[in-house]
Image: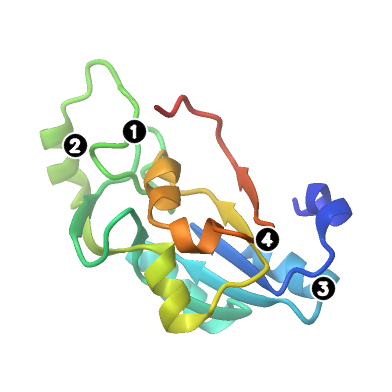
């Protein structure tokens, strides 16, 4: 999955991944570029717990957002209830006919604290010369809005798993 990055990987010090899920990308990065430091952000409590032991770096249980410390209610997307994907209510796509209130009650949605990449960089970095890999379930724009300092003046690559219209 990291093959598209190879031509661009020169002086990358950090691999920052939003939505660590099964940690495959981070482990591929450290195999290919052993000196790269990895930092992950995983909002799903179940997947975060699984990551703590095997993620090749630090992984925190937060949701990437444009503010720090807000409590966000996260719910798995319809059809992906057993996956690690969670989606904040104001970022999820329109699933016509979905009764979100009933859906949230049935799935016991999770509450997680938000974090900006800028705050995480101050606390755990600095994330200089980083590769930013986001798969944050339709919240990519919110995550990037919370990364102004990280994005300023450095070569940062971004990759999204899903293409969505962002305003």
Q: Earlier in the sequence, mark 1 or mark 2?
A: 1
Q: Residue furthest right?
A: 7
The answer to which quarter of the image holds residue 45 is bottom left
Residue at the disc numbered 1: 78
Residue 60 seen: no
Quarter of the image where the C terminus is located: top left
Q: Residue furthest top?
A: 96
Q: Secondary structure at mark 4?
A: helix
Residue at the disc numbered 2: 103
Q: CA distance from mark 3 to mark 4?
A: 12 Å
Cβ atoms at labels 2 and 4 below 8 Å apart: no
Q: Earlier in the sequence, mark 1 or mark 3?
A: 3
Q: CA distance from mark 1 to mark 2?
A: 8 Å
Residue shown at the point (58%, 65%) measured from the top left: 16
Label 2: how many residues lie within 10 Å, few (<14), some (14-19) or many (20+)?
Answer: some
User: Residue 55 versus residue 69: which sits nearer the camera?
Assistant: 69
Residue 86 seen: yes
User: Residue 133 versus residue 79: which sits nearer the camera?
Assistant: 133
Q: Earlier in the sequence, mark 3 or mark 2?
A: 3
Q: Position of residue 57 (x, y in %)?
A: 59, 81
Camera-nearest label, 1 or 3: 3
Residue at the disc numbered 3: 33
Residue shown at the point (52%, 63%) measured from the top left: 150
Cβ atoms at labels 1 and 2 below 8 Å apart: yes
| Mark linked to residue 25 | 4
52 relative to 150, above or below = below
């Amino acid at each position: 999955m990291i093959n598209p990055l190879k031509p661009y990987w020169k002086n990358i010090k950090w691999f920052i991944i939003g939505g660590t899920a099964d940690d495959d990308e981070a482990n591929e990065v450290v195999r290919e570029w052993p000196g790269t430091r990895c930092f992950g952000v995983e909002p799903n409590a179940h997947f975060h717990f699984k990551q703590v032991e095997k993620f090749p770096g630090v992984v925190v249980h937060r949701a990437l957002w444009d503010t720090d410390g807000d409590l966000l209610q996260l719910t798995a997307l319809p059809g992906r209830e057993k996956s690690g994907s969670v989606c904040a209510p104001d970022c999820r796509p329109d699933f016509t006919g979905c009764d979100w209130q009933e859906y949230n009650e049935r799935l016991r949605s999770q509450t997680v604290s938000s974090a900006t990449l800028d705050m995480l960089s101050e606390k755990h970095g600095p994330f200089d010369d980083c590769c930013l890999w986001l798969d944050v379930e339709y919240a990519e724009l919110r995550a990037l809005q919370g990364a102004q300092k990280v994005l300023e003046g450095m070569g940062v690559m971004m990759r999204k798993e899903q293409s969505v219209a962002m305003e």
